């Protein structure tokens, strides 16, 4: 794990940092000097590859690259970045989603891959009449998924066509690969009460539990998955982020190990939808959880908080460490 203070020294409001193959990639927009008489101005997306020097406890730059974009009458912004599998090669590469907002209210989006040579490749371009703001995720393809007006939309670099899923949802808590199902979105929606039941027969606690529920949607197969196999629906009211740390099929049965962070500042671990462990987190408002594997093959949960703090939880005994 990288030294927390050293990472903070790299950050600013205009920078996005991504961990990749033991390095930190720092993405930043840089405007070129305007040349008098020139018709266009140019914005560059720059990347710096940083390696951690254990002796100095600082990050040192190994290499850099840039991608130029014309920016006449436009606002350009980095929306998000992540590591995704390239469908053509199977290689996991850094991916950056850019927004180009024009004066005519049209919002263009560029999806860029970063190769090991520090060369950017534009692999997808699409336009929308609104800005992406809610539950934006990058996944294999590379592809982009987002939520707008409680609907789910996605686009793959293979087709560059915006598609919608036949689901209504209030949030997306995880997107990834599930054995035998392909890319799956785990979301939260208003609960569908059984039609045969009279709503007045439910107790107050039952109504609270059934107020919302988890559901899974397999994008390529276009089918719904039972959310209870991930975790009980009762937790849908408090979960802010989920990570599926293991999924496999044994005797044709799907086995899922999931971990989540909640608005009550807890980390909870589930196996096949059954609660297996809980621990208290050291800060308020946990917003994201990811996994990491150490050199000794220990599984760690990395939890980020709205305050900018992070903590590490060891999977074996749910012991919490603060860097």
Image (cartoon, helix red, strand yellow):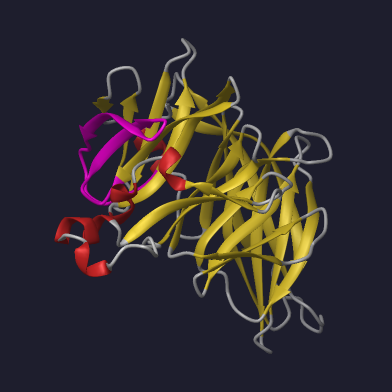
Residue 208, percent from left and from top? 22, 59
In the displayed structure, does residue 46 sit left or right of residue 170?
right
Q: What secondary structure predominates along the stretch shown in magenta?
A: strand
Residue 183 lies, with reference to residue 131, above or below; the image says above
Write down the quadrant of residue 102 in the picture: bottom right
Name the side, left or right, on which 66 lies relative to 170: right
User: Position of 9 compared to 27: left or right?
Assistant: left
Indicate the position of residue 76 as horizontal and vertical percent values.
63, 70
**Magenta region:** 262-288
Determine whether 307 is above or below 22 in the image.
below
Give the farthest residue toward the left.
Answer: 204
Q: Nearer the viewer, residue 52 or 162?
A: 162
Q: Is residue 93 above or below residue 262?
A: above
Which residue is drawn at the image coordinates 39% and 47% (left, top)? 241
For image coordinates 44% across by 24% down, the residue present is 56
Q: Quadrant of residue 210?
A: bottom left
From the viewer's side, name the closer residue of 105 and 75: 105
Residue 60's spot in the image, x, y percent? Answer: 55, 32
Position in image of residue 117 (x %, y %): 78, 37
Q: Residue at x 45, y 49 (%)?
A: 11
Front-lying residue, 53 or 311: 311
């Amino acid at each position: 794990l990288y030294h927390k203070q050293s990472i903070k020294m790299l950050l600013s409001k205009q920078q996005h940092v991504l961990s990749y193959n033991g390095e930190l990639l720092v993405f930043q927009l840089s405007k070129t000097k305007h040349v008098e008489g020139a018709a266009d101005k140019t914005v560059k997306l720059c990347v710096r590859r940083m390696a951690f020097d254990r002796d100095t406890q600082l990050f040192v730059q190994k290499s850099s690259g840039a991608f130029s974009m014309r920016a006449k009458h436009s606002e350009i912004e980095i929306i998000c970045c992540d590591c995704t599998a390239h469908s053509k090669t199977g290689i996991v590469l850094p991916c950056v989603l850019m927004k180009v907002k024009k004066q005519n209210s049209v919002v263009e989006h560029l999806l860029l891959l970063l190769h090991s040579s520090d060369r950017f490749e534009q692999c997808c371009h699409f336009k929308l009449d609104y800005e992406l703001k809610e539950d934006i995720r990058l996944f294999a393809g590379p592809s982009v998924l987002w939520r707008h007006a409680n609907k789910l939309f996605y686009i793959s670099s293979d087709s560059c066509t915006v598609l919608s899923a036949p689901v209504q949802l209030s949030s997306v808590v995880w997107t990834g690969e599930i054995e035998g199902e392909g890319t799956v979105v785990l979301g939260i929606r208003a609960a569908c009460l059984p039609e045969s039941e009279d709503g007045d027969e439910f107790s107050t606690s039952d109504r609270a539990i059934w107020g919302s529920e988890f559901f899974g949607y397999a994008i390529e197969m276009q089918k719904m998955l039972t959310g209870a196999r991930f975790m009980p629906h009762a937790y849908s009211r408090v979960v802010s982020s989920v990570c599926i740390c293991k999924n496999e099929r044994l005797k044709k049965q799907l086995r899922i190990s999931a971990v989540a962070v909640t608005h009550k500042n807890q980390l909870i671990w589930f196996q096949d939808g059954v609660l297996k462990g809980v621990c208290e987190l050291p800060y308020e408002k946990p917003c994201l959880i990811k996994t990491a594997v150490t050199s000794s093959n220990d599984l760690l949960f990395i939890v980020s908080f709205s305050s900018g703090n992070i903590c590490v939880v060891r999977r074996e005994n749910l012991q919490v460490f603060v860097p």
